[in-house]
Image (spheres, rainbow, N blue to C red):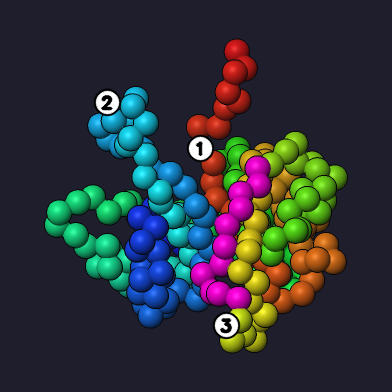
Amino acid sequence: MFKEIISVIPVEKTQSVWQAAKKAGSPGGTILPATGSSSNSLLSILGFGDTPKDILLTIVPESAEQSVRQAIQDECQNRSQHRGVIFSLNVPCFIKSGSKNNLSAEEKSMSNEKFQMINIIMNKGYAEDAMAAARKAGASGGTVLNGRGTAKEGDAKFFGVEIVPEKEMLIILAPTEKTAQIIEAINNLACFSKDGNGIIFTADATGFSLLGKK
């Protein structure tokens, strides 16, 4: 079992937080730019309360979760102000690009929820191909987020994988019974056959409903 650790942190802390997580056992991560809203409603109305944030996503073995979380919390420790939030999600299915293994029966039937959130993090430029394959396999749509890897261009290879700093994250909400075929369709793409081109993982989606539909 794997865990996805999600940290929402001030942008000036991103690199130090990532270095702390890496030392604690995190093998890699993805950073998504975001904006935090002020807890003060008046400042929010005036437009002065928004602050730049980064979302750091990292997937670790369950055995490393506590040490990585603690390292991130220690790095963000500040008595004078609120530094962000951190939480974890179960990751019942995790696939690296270059792996052609089909999902096991256990992975296909892991969840009792009606919907799954399928997350595909890949090198920039491949999200449209992944979405096209997902649609053919039964997905109705998805959302693409732009981000960057935790490594910088020009760094040495990471675990023998060529580093590409710019990333795209494709999020697809799909019925659980269609999840396995969608994952397999994406995993069989030529652009996903090379090691280091991306990862796929899932999480349960609870309380799912369409906004605006009565």
Residue type indicated by callout 2:
Leu
Secondary element under disc 2, as helix, strand or loop, is helix
Tell me if residue 148 is in the magenta stretch. Answer: yes
Q: Nearer the viewer, residue 174 or 168?
A: 168
| Label whose residue precedes the other's in the sequence (2 or 3) | 2
Q: Residues within 10 Å of mark 3 (few under 14, many from 20)?
A: few
SS at circle 3:
loop
The disc at residue 187 is none
Q: Which residue is mark 1?
A: 206
Q: Reading the chain from its start, which is encountered first: label 3 or label 1?
A: 3
Query: Is residue 193 left or right of 44 when viewed as pictured?
Result: right
Q: Hey, which residue is sitting farthest top in the picture?
A: 214
Residue range of the region highlighted in magenta in the rendering: 143-153
**Label 2 to label 3, Cα distance in Å?**
44 Å
Badge 2 is on which residue?
A: 42
Q: Residue furthest left?
A: 79
**Where is residue 121 drawn, in percent x and y?**
63, 59
When asked about the image quadrant of residue 114, the answer is: top right
Please say if the residues under marks 2 and 1 sit with CB atoms less than 8 Å apart. Answer: no
Q: Residue 80's quadrant in the figure?
A: bottom left
Q: Quick check: 94 above or below 208?
A: below
User: In the picture provided, is 96 more to the left or to the right than 58?
Assistant: right
Q: Give percent across and percent down for residue 143.
A: 65, 42
Nearer to me, 137 or 170? 170
Q: Name the disc covering residue 155, or none.
A: 3
